[in-house]
Amino acid sequence: MISYKTLGLVNTREMFKKAVKGGYAIPAFNFNNMEQLQAIVMAAVETKSPVILQVSKGARDYANQTLLRYMAEGAVEYAKELGCEKPEIVLHLDHGDSFETCKSCIDMGFSSVMIDGSHLPYEENVALTKKVVEYAHQFDVTVEGDLGVLAGVEDEVSAAESHYTKPEEVVDFVTKTGCDSLAISIGTSHGAYKFTPEQCTVDPETGRLLPPPLAFDVLAAIEEQLPGFPIVLHGSSSVPQDDVDTINQNGGKLVAAVGIPEEQLRKASKSAVCKINIDSDSRLAMTAAVRKTLAEKPGEFDPRKYLGPARESMKKLYMHKIINVLGSNDKL
Ligand code: G3H
Ligand code: 13P
């Protein structure tokens, strides 16, 4: 059993309390490799922001859970080396699919886990989440529960349509399970194709697809039921069209990729939404930079020469999200 505390990591409890009170959201960025991690840490240090490092099942399969845990420990030391005296870094399991997965992460030093029982019948979701909470809280690890289903692919769980979280269920769920935060569904979804063209309208000036707005009425009803309780939004990439264009101009083919407009995330950050998950935007920034560099320098074969610009581009993206969208800068 390795306690995250010995690795210099923190759980989400105090971080969320301050974020809800202060009207901002903590960035939860997924990472799978060194360049993403370096970019996240550099951005968090430069903006003086707390940060959540998220590890999905896909990331654990790709990069190995043990290695990712040591990388997170390294991230704390790296942040200090960059000049941050007291970094606030959470290592979080994204979409834990079973008690065993959550336990394995808790036992090896994760400071926060998500148990995703959103696809289960309600009572089964309650029972599973409660079991994870009871185990996690013995070690002061915080737990994110999930109510409501997002359209698209959540790790290996996929759903054709989203089902908004039912505000009438949230008090019962939080009381029975004891979870520390709650992921809700109000119209976001995972990936770079969040809406079909039929669900969008077309901007007459740019010809770009304009997505339907998030269900802020559902969010308000949830907040009314659970005043001040930490709420989480998954699937919150904005799918920057500049990066989509760069990818397509350099041999890629992303057709009708559309995300959540940043004004809506800015609005959500000011509410009880205190954790916003962003993964796809970082993938797009990385891919755009790699494609552009290789197109411009076809003779290049040193990975540092194309992963370096990719890392720089991700760092810029993370800083932009922190400062201009979530508002978590200068909160350390
Ligand atoms: O849950 C969605 C995240 O973007 C993780 O995606 O399972 O492909 O790593 P992944
Ligand atoms: P995006 O695909 O919108 O970046 O969402 C990531 C996410 O919610 C991870 O859990």
Image (tube, rainbow, N blue to C red):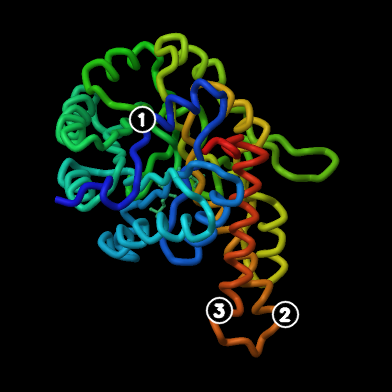
- The residue carrying mark 1 has its beta carbon less than 8 Å from ligand 2: no
Regarding mark 1 in the picture, which secondary structure is present there? helix
Task: Residue at 36% x, 62% y: name it.
Answer: 71
Look at mark 3 in the image and give the residue it sits on.
Answer: 304
First in sequence, mark 3 or 1: give its number: 1
Mark 1 and mark 2 residues within 8 Å of each other at the beta carbon: no
What x and y, as percent, mark residue 244? 66, 57
Residue 134 percent location from the top left of the image: 16, 30
Frontmost of labels 3 and 1 is 1
Q: Nearer the viewer, residue 77 or 27?
A: 77
Bin the neighbour count of mark 3 within 10 Å (Cα to Cα): few under 14, some 14-19, many 20 and up: few
Instruction: Answer left or right for 45 relative to 154.
Output: right
The residue where tag 1 is placed is: 13
Q: Amino acid at mark 3?
A: Arg
The reply to whether dot 3 and dot 1 touch (C-beta < 8 Å) is: no
Left or right, 18 with respect to 315, comes to: left
* Residue drawn at (21%, 24%) of the image: 126
Query: Neighbour class for label 1 at 10 Å: few (<14), some, many (≥20)?
Result: some
Answer with mark 2 or mark 3, whichever residue precedes in sequence: 2
Which label lies toward us, 1 or 2?
1
Identify the element where label 3 is drawn: helix
Image disc number at residue 296: 2
SS of the residue under disc 2: helix
Which label sits on residue 292? none
Amino acid type of the residue that numbered disc 1 sits on in the rendered structure: Arg
Q: Nearer the viewer, residue 83 or 228?
A: 83
Q: Residue at x 54, y 59 (%)?
A: 39
Query: Quick one: 55 or 137, which is closer to the camera?
Result: 137
Q: Residues within 10 Å of mark 2 (few under 14, many from 20)?
A: few
Does 197 sit above or below residue 82?
above
